[in-house]
Amino acid sequence: GLLLTRINVPVRHRGQGHARTLLARVLADADRECVMLWLQISPSDGLTYRQLASWYGRHGFFEHEEGLYQRLPQDPRRI
């Protein structure tokens, strides 16, 4: 699997879909290659752990153990 540690978008560029676009590319590649993704959430620049956990959760990540999230490969034909 691969470990994601941070997608950091400067505050002035947030809300424009940059992080979503980047993560979508990573997820598509991981799904195509059947790679499990791991994630450590690191709040910064005013975003809380809860906000980030919710955002990553909407993209298929779930808490595996405290502080460590996981996303299983998905069949791209079903997305």
Image (spheres, grey):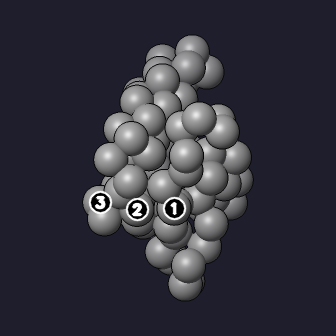
18 relative position to 6: left or right = right
Q: Secondary structure at mark 2?
A: loop
Q: Amino acid at mark 3?
A: Leu
The answer to whether mark 2 and mark 3 are in CB contact below 8 A is: yes
Which residue carries the number 1 mark?
Answer: 72
Q: Position of residue 73 (x, y in %)?
A: 48, 55
46 relative position to 54: left or right = left
The residue positioned farthest toward the bottom in the image shown: 65
Q: Residue, x 55% and y 84% (percent of image)?
A: 65
68 to 35, vertically: above or below: below
18 to 65, vertically: above or below: above
Which residue carries the number 2 mark?
Answer: 36
The answer to whether mark 1 and mark 2 are in CB contact below 8 A is: yes
**Mark before the other along the chain sequence, 3 or 1:** 3
Which residue carries the number 3 mark?
Answer: 2
Q: Amino acid at mark 2?
A: Met
Q: Position of residue 21 (x, y in %)?
A: 48, 24
The residue positioned farthest toward the front in the image shown: 77
